[in-house]
Amino acid sequence: DAGVIQSPRHEVTEMGQEVTLRCKPISGHNSLFWYRQTMMRGLELLIYFNNNVPIDDSGMPEDRFSAKMPNASFSTLKIQPSEPRDSAVYFCASSANRGASYNEQFFGPGTRLTVL
Amino acid sequence: QKEVEQNSGPLSVPEGAIASLNCTYSDRGSQSFFWYRQYSGKSPELIMFIYSNGDKEDGRFTAQLNKASQYVSLLIRDSQPSDSATYLCAVKGWTGTASKLTFGTGTRLQVTL
């Protein structure tokens, strides 16, 4: 089975440009998470969806960031306009939320974003 | 105070030794605790989880949890060079609908020959 798929794997853009990151979760998983990882702040949860509905977006840095999940197999994270401080690795993860005490999150390969 | 704290390291241990990685958390309502391993340039992968006080063993790995002290640790026995990676501690608080995890910044482990 394919794991979590993210695209692009690398993105270099100039300040002010719009950036769209894409994620396809594992088939059958109903929870999807967007994370950002930097050396200084580590792995931070930006937003997560359950059954395509945004549950908690308190980690989204500011209005420049937005995320959508139009269906169970696709999600986007958009940054508009991008700034150099947005440079980081962005991970998408998915899990099968079955109400257990834990639901393992499977991470995609990440998108390395560089904003010049 | 950060919600989940780890020593950033690097923690250097010789091959064959026991590596001990530690993590403290601030939310007493936390329910489950996870250890993820992340190789350089790769994504995190789950290696252990624990939700009851005490020890949980899986091969060379042992997770230890002490909820009273808000402390969780990971022991790696017979450390191998392939264990060299960053180890992320993650904590699941109480949420009604999904497993939201809060991660520490990770401890970098170096296993030397």
Image: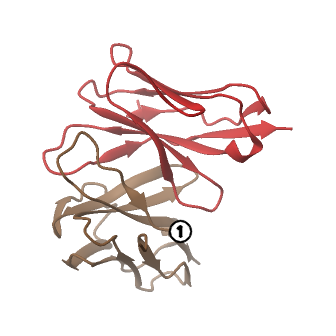
Chain colours: A brown, B red
Q: Quadrant of residue A34?
A: bottom left
Q: Residue furthest top?
A: B68
At horizontal 70% and vertical 37% (from top left) the residue drawn is B10
Residue A54, x across and y down, in percent: 18, 64
At horizontal 20% and vertical 37% (from top left) the residue drawn is B94
User: What type is the residue that disc 1 sits on?
Assistant: Ser
Task: Answer yes or no: is residue A65 visible.
Answer: yes
Give whichever of A20, B60 is nearer the camera.
B60
Tag 1: Cα neighbours inside 10 Å, few (<14), some, or many (≥20)?
A: some
In the image, residue B112 above or below residue A116: above
Residue A11, x across and y down, in percent: 54, 81
Residue A67, x across and y down, in percent: 27, 73
Residue hosting label 1: A87
Residue B68, x across and y down, in percent: 33, 13
Task: Answer yes or no: is residue B2 visible.
Answer: no
At horizontal 26% and vertical 58% (from top left) the residue drawn is A96
- Secondary element under disc 1, as helix, strand or loop, is loop
Seen in the image, is B60 located left or right of residue A20?
A: right
Pinpoint the chain carrying mark 1. A
